Image (cartoon, coloured by chain):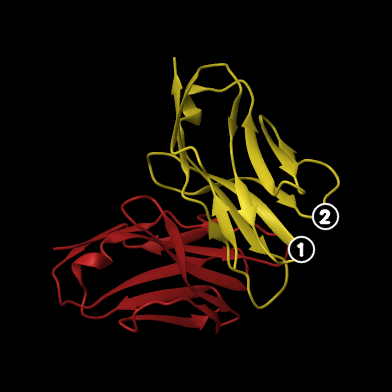
Amino acid sequence: DTAVSQTPKYLVTQMGNDKSIKCEQNLGHDTMYWYKQDSKKFLKIMFSYNNKELIINETVPNRFSPKSPDKAHLNLHINSLELGDSAVYFCASSQGEPSPLHFGNGTRLTVT
Amino acid sequence: AQKITQTQPGMFVQEKEAVTLDCTYDTSDPSYGLFWYKQPSSGEMIFLIYQGSYDQQNATEGRYSLNFQKARKSANLVISASQLGDSAMYFCAMKPKFFGNEKLTFGTGTRLTIIP
């Protein structure tokens, strides 16, 4: 009965590879997000989708491409991985106002 | 642009004492929401408490309360009777309350350690 689930939990890969992180929410929320948490624990938004439409796209390299096949899913594909992409990536969802974001448990990506 | 400032990178507090985590913010949005999240060492993000900018009363949730001072643009989190399980990172965050820019902006966090 997990509300926001993301897979995998850990991802270790080499520079130059392409990888994907999947996210699903069963809360019926309209809005989903990807956040990146760096090594200093700072959380920064990357993307936001509302009903499958992109509404927020922060200054993220175009190697990162989100895809939302339906409003319950928001996947993140990363091309040509770099060392600086190593971080914890959080998926989240929310509905209306005032609504907190519900976060998944994070995916720790390590690029070697 | 929104900005959240948490000036305490780390705090050590004796068990059972109350603790106040500071948060100040800056925004030009007339209506916004303020949130606090807890991130234990296991890594998950746990929502604690919410305060709306037009709410007349300070928010409370169990041992958590939010000391909201709108004129000062501060939204401090107060944890009463601290417990060992309160040891974690705490993040203050803000979101404007209108559709089209539902971006939750986080502060840099405060690492709270409860001492037995």
Q: Quadrant of residue B98?
A: bottom right
Q: Position of residue A8 (x, y in %)?
A: 31, 62
- Label 2 environment density (alpha carbons within 10 Å; few <14, some 14–19, many ≥20): few
Chain letter for red, please: A
Q: Position of residue B5 (x, y in %)?
A: 54, 49
Left or right: residue B98 compared with residue B92: right
**In the current view of this chain or complex, which residue is farthest to the right?**
B56
| Quadrant (top left/top right/bottom left/bottom right) for the C terminus of chain A | bottom left
The type of residue carrying mark 1 is Ser
Q: Looking at the picture, does residue B82 appear above or below residue A30? A: above
The residue at which mark 2 appears reads as B54
Residue B105 in sight: yes
Left or right: residue A40 compared with residue A91: left
The residue at which mark 1 appears reads as B31
Please count the marks in the image: 2
Q: Nearer the viewer, residue A76 or B71?
A: B71
Chain letter for yellow, please: B
Q: Residue at x 34, y 50 (%)?
A: A40
The type of residue carrying mark 2 is Tyr
Left or right: residue B95 compared with residue A39: right
Q: Earlier in the sequence, mark 2 or mark 1?
A: 1
Q: Position of residue B111 (x, y in %)?
A: 44, 36
Disc 2 on helix, strand or loop?
loop
